[in-house]
Amino acid sequence: MSKKTEILKPDLRLIAWEITRSCNLNCIHCRAAAERGPYQGELATEECFRFIDEVAAFSRPVLILTGGEPLLREDIFEIASYSTRKGLRAVMAVNGTLLTAEKARAAKQAGIQRVSISLDGAAAESHDRFRGVSGAFAGAMEGISYLKEAGLAFQINTTVTKRNLTEIESILQLAIQLGATAHHIFLLVPTGRGKELAGEDVLPEAYERTLVWFAEQEDKAPLQLKATCAPQYYRIIHQHGDAKDRKGQGEGLHTFTRGCLGGISFCFLSHQGDVQPCGYLEIIGGNIKERPFQEIWEKAEVFQRLRDINLLKGKCGQCEYRAVCGGCRARAYALHGDYLEEEPLCPYEPLHHQRAKRVKEQLSK
């Protein structure tokens, strides 16, 4: 593959917008270490409208209204409704505890297409411990019931750590029983409050087994499955696809989705207007109060570098799956201080490394 073809073209498909950093829970893994607030410098309603105008002028991405807890903003449905009128697909990520029948109906009327509810345990004890507030599980269940009454699609999000790894299958079954449209798992990135979970990262081998298991569920589970902050998932999907190809049962590698989208098809907007590749990679490309969003997205140095696959280091730079995986750049930055370094939780050895190892072993005989 030539170097020219390894520079990925930006295609803005998703924006995660930290509409507020304020939150009513105290989650142990929170990347923002969010508290009740208020936080200074949050974008005002009119600034939010201007941002939506800027985005709609050149793209039509999915706009993920997240936080913190989005429902703590009094103008959340006004902002959602405005984005819908501008042709953007608005979705919302909440913890579920602040949802009411009235708010669920308001979300539906504002044009919100889907709401995600976080469940990090299959029962109250484990989920509440993870979320730092007693009653969080019961509140999430009640919130889901209001979404169902309003006829609003919902998905379940789960952050995977050592403490809930054994519950992942049960959480998936719970998502199915509840009637969720999708189940998305997130592999822990040690940022924010998550830094305090040292030693709770899933080890590379267990990480791999979990992702292989999750991939196997795609043909079994009656809902959409997606692994986030786990780009190796797409290498695993490709490996399975390769096997099918050789049997004449599958399609080529080009048909699959890429793993890490940060700076390529995805970006994050903070509550103060900072634009980052993702919420976990806290390197600022620019602020929308100071520079046009499109200019930041297209020209910021961090985005330009993330789109150049040739700049990846270590085994990520030599991996034959680098164009479809890319490794978690935020995890690399958190552990190495360099977002272009190799993914620290990937056990896969590139073919180049495997060949070199075999040659070394043969020479040592």
Image (spheres, helix red, strand yellow):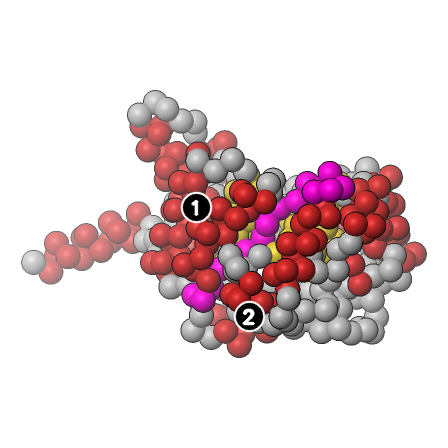
Question: Dot 1 corresponds to which residue?
Answer: 214
Pointer 2: residues within 10 angstroms few (<14), some, or many (20+)?
some
- From the viewer's perspective, is 355 left or right of 96? left
Q: Quadrant of residue 270?
A: bottom right
Q: Residue at x 36, y 58 (%)?
A: 206
- What secondary structure is marked by label 2? helix
Placement of the N terminus among the 4 image quadrants: top left
* Residue 287 seen in this snapshot: no
Residue 236 vertical position relative to residue 71 in the rendered view, above or below: above
Q: Return the mark for residue 129.
A: 2
**Residue in front for this viewpoint, 362 or 128:** 128
Would you call the spot at circle 1 few (<14 residues within 10 Å), some (14-19), or many (20 or more)?
many
Kind of residue at badge 2: Arg
* Front in this rendered view, residue 118 or 317: 118
Span colored in magenta = 148-163
- Residue at image point 73% right, 42% down: 149
Q: Amino acid at mark 1?
A: Phe
Spatial CA distance of label 1 from label 2 is 24 Å
In the rendered view, would you say 239 is above or below 31?
A: above
The residue depicted at 75 percent of the width and 60 percent of the height is 98
